[in-house]
Image (cartoon, grey):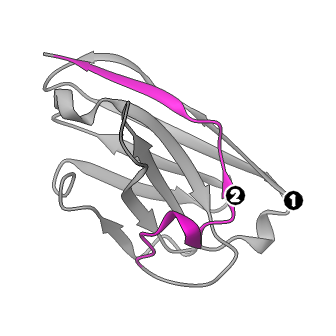
């Protein structure tokens, strides 16, 4: 089993920045792509960003491209999401996810096997 624990959420003003972290533990050798999703109240969970096992192939949702950066430290089994120029519409619970299957650009939540508990991001206008 793999456990994912997110941290770094909080309250920030529009235009500000936050950095989310997701630490993986357990059978981390079994996971490959890792990603971030978010879910706003009353909405479905949506894809934000994903990155390959090597950290060399990031992929973003159009809504965050140019503002968010996903990165991965394989030695620390940690994935990060640097969020800049935050907007009120970025407000959501952000979830970290990990997949067992090798792949690139996986945007469907069903492609991920493990999930964190989520961290709240609130952006005030």
Q: Secondary structure at mark 1?
A: loop
Checking the image for residue 1, the label placed there is 1
Question: Would residue 86 be found to the left or right of residue 74 on screen?
Answer: left
Q: Is label 2 in contact with label 1 (beta carbons under 8 Å)? A: yes
Q: Quadrant of residue 18?
A: top left
Location of residue 93 in the rendering, given as x and y in whole percent from the top left corner: 45, 33
Q: Secondary structure at mark 2?
A: strand
Q: Quadrant of residue 71?
A: bottom left
At x 39% / y 26%, what residue is drawn?
121
Does residue 8 appear in this view?
no
Viewport quadrant of the C terminus = top left
Residue 109 painted magenta = yes
Question: Would residue 42 be found to the left or right of residue 1 on screen?
Answer: left
Checking the image for residue 114, the label placed there is 2
Viewport quadrant of the N terminus = bottom right
Q: Quadrant of residue 30?
A: bottom right
At x 38% / y 30%, what residue is drawn?
41
- Asked if residue 92 is positioned above or below residue 124 in the image, the reply reads below
Residue 7 painted magenta = no
Q: Are there few (<14), some (14-19), or many (20+) residues within 10 Å of tag 2?
A: some
Q: Are there few (<14), some (14-19), or many (20+) residues within 10 Å of tag 1?
A: few
Location of residue 84 in the rendering, given as x and y in whole percent from the top left corner: 22, 37
Location of residue 6 in the rendering, given as x and y in whole percent from the top left corner: 59, 37
How many discs mark residues in the rendered view? 2
- Asked if residue 70 is positioned above or below residue 5 in the image, the reply reads below
Q: Which residues are magenta?
A: 105-124
- Asked if residue 19 is positioned above or below residue 12 in the image, the reply reads below
């Amino acid at each position: 089993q793999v456990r994912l624990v997110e941290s770094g959420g909080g309250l920030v003003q529009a235009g500000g920045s936050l950095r989310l972290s997701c630490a993986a533990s357990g059978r981390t050798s079994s996971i490959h792509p890792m990603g971030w999703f978010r879910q706003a109240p009353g909405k479905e969970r949506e894809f934000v960003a994903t990155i390959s096992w090597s950290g060399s192939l990031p992929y973003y949702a159009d809504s965050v491209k140019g503002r968010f950066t996903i990165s991965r430290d394989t030695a620390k089994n940690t994935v990060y999401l640097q969020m800049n120029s935050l907007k009120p519409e970025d407000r959501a619970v952000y979830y970290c996810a990990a997949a067992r299957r090798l792949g690139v650009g996986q945007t469907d939540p069903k492609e991920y096997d493990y999930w964190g508990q989520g961290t709240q991001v609130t952006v005030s206008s």
